[in-house]
Image: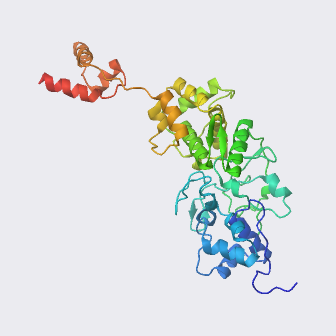
Amino acid sequence: MRLSGRYFPYHPKPQPDELLSSWIIRTAQGHGQTPYVFCHNVWPKTQVWTRDIDNLGTPLVWRTMAERTGTQPDRAWSTTLRSLEGELIEIYPAVGFARWILPLGIYHRMRRRHGLQFCPLCLWQDEKPYFRRHWRLGWVTACIHHGCRLLDRCHACAEALAPHRTMDLTLCYSCLADLREASIDQADGGAMRLQIEAEQVLAQGWGICHDWVFQRPFLYFEILRQVVRILTNGKRAARLRHAVLEAGPIKGEDRLEAQYRDIEYLTVKDREFLMTLAGYLMTDWPHHFTETCAMAGVWWSWAKKENDNLPFAYEDPVKAALFRQAYIPTMEETRAAVLHLMRQGKKPSSTNVRLILGETQHLDRVIRSLAWRGR
């Protein structure tokens, strides 16, 4: 068949759930060109590989790919992560960090973060290997088809994946190891169950979590991310993880290696562990969650975690179960504590008074008032 010139000489369609960058790389390889050379020829004034092209979803790039490969625009748009706006994320940010999207940490043409995951068995069985869009999502830690944990780096040299720097998608750019030959580990069953549920919510556009119905999928993912956030960040996160391990069907030790970081910046092993814990807390919502939080001393102020935009299905039941009215000590109680400290020869500071009365709200105000009256 003669080509009209409208299409690339080699013009493959995107494969199921393929990433835009993967589609571009396969097209370049079909022309016998490196991705750098191909993109410079097609978009001479656009820097493609010095940015996260999947995350940005640059219209010029995906529209050109649609036109030059004979692909429907909607299908080409779906290869970008930005097409998840309104589904995974309510409002996708114009630039920068996006919730649930694993960052690549691009510096010039290098990748400093392990934001591209893969399944060696999928790459091995693909007639034409490619990278999936859902491998860039933070709550995805397993290949459901093969039941194995995903990998987020080269098995030989531990470098982050950068397939645009090779002539073969299945090779590590750094050591040229074949990614398909990497050994695999069985995925955690609890994390896989939660992932299957999350994938169903995203695919059908709504979800059910016990008695709560989510008409928009991003509401479900907002709750899931908040649960994971308090499992990871803060002084009481370790206590909550320990409480889940004690109360739930998950037995073992707390094996979270990195703390005080958003889930998008954790390794696949850490994220799998958190998804296992979150899977228990999301079951029978919100009862498992609130009961375990109360057991760990995680009350509403901690469960809220300075987030003023929580979905109603989180804020209403969790606040009702975990909100504790602040105790304000009386002037007589505070005076007695101060006199007790002075008799012992100790300074009646706020810290020492708290050791007697506990972590009570407004204590500083009461102590200041008492000191003013003393003058």
**Position of residue 221 in the picture relative to residue 176 (left or right):** left
**How far from the left and from the top, in percent, is residue 91?**
54, 57
| Residue at 63% over, 79% down | 43
Residue 281: quarter of image: top right
Q: Is residue 69 visible?
A: yes
- 256 left or right, relative to 357: right
Q: Quadrant of the N terminus?
A: bottom right
For the rendered model, the colour scheme is rainbow
Q: How far from the left and from the top, in percent, is residue 261? A: 53, 45
Identify whether 4 is placed above or below 78: below
Q: In the rendered image of this protein, does residue 300 appear above or below residue 1?
A: above
Q: Is residue 157 visible to the viewer in this orientation of the structure?
A: no
> Which quarter of the rendered picture does the C terminus lie within?
top left
Displayed quadrant of residue 16: bottom right
Foreground of the two, 324 or 332 = 324
Residue located 70% across and 50% down the image: 204
Left or right placement of residue 372 versus residue 119 in this view = left
Please state the total of marks drawn on the protein image. Answer: 0
